[in-house]
Image (cartoon, rainbow, N blue to C red):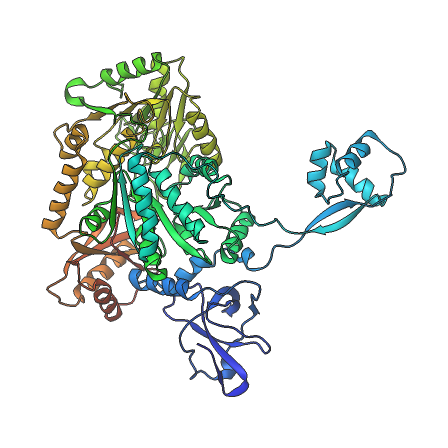
Amino acid sequence: MLFDDFEPKDTIASVLVPVAVPVAYTYKVPSGKSVVPGTIVRVPLGTREVIGAVWDGEPDAAINPTKLKSISHVYDATPPLDKDLRRFVDWVAGWTLGAPGMVVRMVLRSEEALEPEAPVPGVRRIEGAEPERMTPARRRVLETMEDGFAWTKSGLAHAAGVSTSVIDGLVQQEVLEIVSMPAAPPPPRPQIDYAKKDLTPAQQAAAEALSKSFDKGAAVTLIDGVTGSGKTEVYFEAIAEALRRDRQALVLLPEIALTEQFLRRFEQRFGVYPAEWHSEITPKNRARVWRGVASGDVRVVIGARSSLFLPFKELGLIIVDEEHDAAFKQDDRVPYSARDMAVVRGHISRFPVVLASATPSIESRVNAEQGRYGLVELPDRASGAALPDLSAIDMRLDGPEQGRWLAPGLVGAIKETYANGDQALLFLNRRGYAPLTLCRTCGHRFQCPHCSTWLVEHRFQKKLVCHHCGHNERVPESCPSCQSTNTLVACGPGVERIAEEVSDLFPQARTLVLSSDLPGGPERLKREMKVVDDGGDDIIIGTQLVAKGHNFPKLMLVGVVDADLGLAHGDPRAAEKTFQLLAQVTGRAGRVTGGGKGFLQTYSAEHPVIKALLSNDKHAFYQAEIEARRAAGLPPFGRLAAVVISGPDKNFAEGFARQLARVAPPDQAVTLLGPAEAALAMVRGRYRFRLLAIAPKQYDLQSFIRGWLSNGPKPTKGLRVQIDIDPQHFL
């Protein structure tokens, strides 16, 4: 709220700034300017200026007006943040116990977007003007400009096949004139009925259910469909319905690598590409998308979790694809779950939210069973193809020979697949060549100096790399501990090591490694995915990137190299995550024609997760896991909150954690565990200790923690206390 104070000329306003403070600051509004809640402004903060937003609530009128700083700039050309978005920011801050300023920071990430895009300089033909001397290059330029339109210098030079110096020469001779061209035009709108696909009866029923949800306000629908069941085509119809109602739509994807294939499918359905929002797009494109979303010119956005905080003008639908994926949880600054916050944003603005997955999270599945969410099931593949036939390879009985990592049974299946001209995928969720390098003479292990983890060998790059802080070093010629030469040995396999073995076994096959650390970054990854999609590779070796949402028509075989990898952690969600990951990756096989096969290399063939996968009994696994959660009082039947203390001094951090635990309010409803050293005891040079609070589902855990921390010791000497409500990771 704003009001006049002291003198008629003095107007003050509350401004939320992007810093970790619990309240908004009070500023004077410059004379001749007016602001309302949501107005975006630039204000002085200490020795710098920051972008903030005028916020709801009374400014502090008790402050001496002579001591108030004034707003430096008001972004009049940018629409104010609407009431629903401001409520959403406050809700996220309250739920995560984060500072509202750090949440609004995620809204105001693109400062370049706050001003209209500057005109682009161009050139235009002066009617009747001719050059002093006509050359072939000049003639090509003038012939290209016969349409009378203005061109950018670079665009004209490229179209005419000349250098920009030719353009400059024509300008100097006053044959061409410099003009200002308008910024990029608004993107074309998706065409609702551009290429509507024929749906199966099950898909059509699901699409109709989603269309009806628009009349129910804040309805949440879970699409639980097997891999290849056509979930994307179904929610495309929900997007079409949103566009038909003149509303914007947002599709959240867990990985940037998914966007290329998704964009092509969207273009085939709606005739245009949607807008993209993720960390890899250029600042200029980010600014255009932000402005387009705020003005309503951009109708559909495909984005990572951060796109949830874009200032949509008319948002009317959110789709969370692969809703179970842990990538939707942000762990730094403001730890929030994009899936859960999408539901909240839909609730605040009264529009439908769609969650889609072949392996839904336990939380979503329980909410659907209890009637909080609508449930749409797609039990069969859209192509009519059968689900892949899965087999376990017991490595204790049928493992490979020493020095190899692929069991003979899996190698034989790859040979058969390759001979048939089909693709095979080998999955191992480990980047690099080997997870550990040691000296066989003295036992020295190469560890990151900043983190409690081993350095991973990347043999292709000849580096040892930490995957937590990015530290890397060259592989040494000798052991740094005993100086022995030729004694370093790589222990365990990564995708590079599997690729090396595949090259030895199948020298004629076209092999490809797909990993997030692929040289060339996301753009190269997208190109490689396109090659795989077109059948250009025979054997693909990949990490979890290949387990999410991809449709490879020629893929007939999936081999999981280490199916037990995710089961050995002290994570209460370990079984659920492993089941989801393995079901997703094996589900890539035979999606179009059927006849797909999957092999799980395991040392625990009797494990319930492995048995559930082999029996293809997803519902039995979910029911068993749900009952286990219920008995233990774990989410979704209880609440968890992690308190992570980190600092540069181990003893001081541990002492603070113990002191904090001692002052916890006594409450029989809350069980407090710890403090204990984190599984990753040190990350980026900071020592970490964890406390875990467990409470019943209806208990107000945020209020408990808020009161606890307010009465506890204050962090000093570089200590940091981070609260993680509903933690997804326990490292």
Q: Give the total number of marks visible in the rendering.
A: 0
Residue at (44%, 55%) from the top-left corner?
A: 310
* Residue 307 percent across, percent down from the top left: 42, 51
Report which quarter residue 380 is drawn in.
top left
* Residue 548 percent across, percent down from the top left: 34, 36
Q: Is residue 38 above or below residue 392?
A: below
Task: State the residue lying farthest toward the right.
Answer: 132
Q: Is residue 416 left or right of residue 314?
A: left
- Does the rendering let one see residue 441? yes
* Residue 444 percent across, percent down from the top left: 28, 32
Which of the image's four quarters has the N terminus? bottom left
Q: Is residue 8 above or below residue 566?
A: below
Q: Front-most of 4 and 707? A: 4
Q: Front-most of 421 and 333? A: 421
Report which quarter residue 168 is drawn in.
top right
- Does the rendering let one see residue 447? no
Q: Front-most of 391 and 702? A: 391
* Residue 587 percent across, percent down from the top left: 28, 30
Q: Is residue 189 left or right of residue 627?
A: right
